[in-house]
Amino acid sequence: MIDRLQLERLRELATDIRRRDLEMVHRARLGHIGGDLSATDILATLYFAVLKVDPEAPDWPERDRFILSKGHCAGALYTTLAEKGFIERDELRTYMQPHSRLGGHPDRTKMPGVETNTGPLGHGLPVAVGCALGAKIDGAAWRTFVLTGDGELQEGSNWEAALSAAHYKLDNLTVVVDRNGLQQGDFTERTMHLDPLPDKWTAFGWSVREVNGHDHAALLDVFDQLPFQWGKPNCIIAHTHKGQGVSFMRDRPAWHHRVPTDAELAHALSELNGHRVLA
Ligand SMILES: Cc1ncc(C[n+]2csc(CCOP(=O)(O)OP(=O)(O)O)c2C)c(N)n1
Ligand SMILES: [Mg+2]
């Protein structure tokens, strides 16, 4: 049964993450806010209800591994990791500054909690397959999760990795596809057809579920069902909206990497949260 208090907490966390991310991107004058906002509810649910990770011991060997394959959305990951306690919230102010640990893409050599460097699309899933296979060989209980973009699936490396995950029966591996229907400059279906996307993953030997990627209860429920089928890797197609939470950013291609003006930031923050002051 889903706990109402947990759901309320997730909603508050996701709102806080969105607000801090918007402020961070506005301050730096750089970032990918549209894709950050589509991934926020997935990240909040993973980090606060699913992943076994310990901010006090980021290298704990038994931790679950999470890889943000859509590395351009580092802003959403940094704000989530800060909320979780991997870094001080104040450090978010250094995003994109010279010598900051918080660069445009996640760097595992700098940032605690980052498992692998990403940014060039199409590499997170291949690395995740290696992690999951390693855990199987070791007989370890930890799981591997990877979040990909949908436009990112145009990279052929994903499909090679998908083949091998099924071949090695990696039921300890879960890919979440952030299915927001948009890529850098246009809609995915106008650029390169992905649909029927669930059928493609199924044909590659994966067990597939679809979910509303902004519904925390639905996300909790689907993560709770893992593994979906013994001996098969798991694919969750999360239907999302780029720019979710801010009306004038939602589903608009321009907000892939536009930066809000002062007035737009104020508007966005007021929309996101009338009821709560950040700590
Ligand atoms: C190999 C590679 N090609 C191009 C880019 C530039 N790029 C950054 S984000 C992006 C679009 C990604 O779209 P999608 O995967 O759907 O991400 P989201 O919509 O979640 O932002 C592109 C083409 C890149 N980072 N890597
Ligand atoms: Mg997309």
Image (cartoon, rainbow, N blue to C red):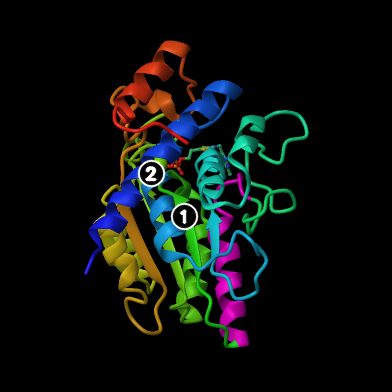
Q: Quadrant of ligand 2?
A: top left
Instruction: Tell me the amino acid under the disc marked 2.
Output: Ala
Point out the residue furthest to the right here: 99
Secondary structure beneath disc 2? Answer: helix
124 versus 165 height, above or below: above
Q: Main secondary structure of the magenta part?
A: helix
In the figure, residue 63 lies in which quadrant? bottom right
- Where is the N terminus found, in terms of image quarters? bottom left
Percent position of residue 186, x then y: 38, 30
| Residue numbers of the magenta segment | 118-138
Task: From the viewer's side, name the closer residue of 244 and 173.
Answer: 244
Percent position of residue 155, x then y: 51, 51
Image-based side of 108 in relation to 92, left or right = right
Magenta segment includes 127: yes
208 versus 4 height, above or below: below
- The residue at 46%/48% (across/down) is 154
Picture disc at residue 14: 2
Ranked by sequence position, the earlier of labels 1 and 2 is 2
178 versus 220 height, above or below: above
Query: Mark 2: is the Cβ under 8 angstroms from ligand 1?
Result: no
Instruction: Tell me the amino acid under the disc marked 1.
Output: Leu
Percent position of residue 246, x then y: 32, 28
- The residue at 24%/64% (across/down) is 2
Circle 2: is it few (<14), some (14-19), or many (20+) Cα within 10 Å?
many
Residue annotated with mark 1? 147
Circle 1: is it few (<14), some (14-19), or many (20+) Cα within 10 Å?
many
Observer able to see residue 199:
no
Task: From the viewer's side, name the closer residue of 88 and 216.
Answer: 88
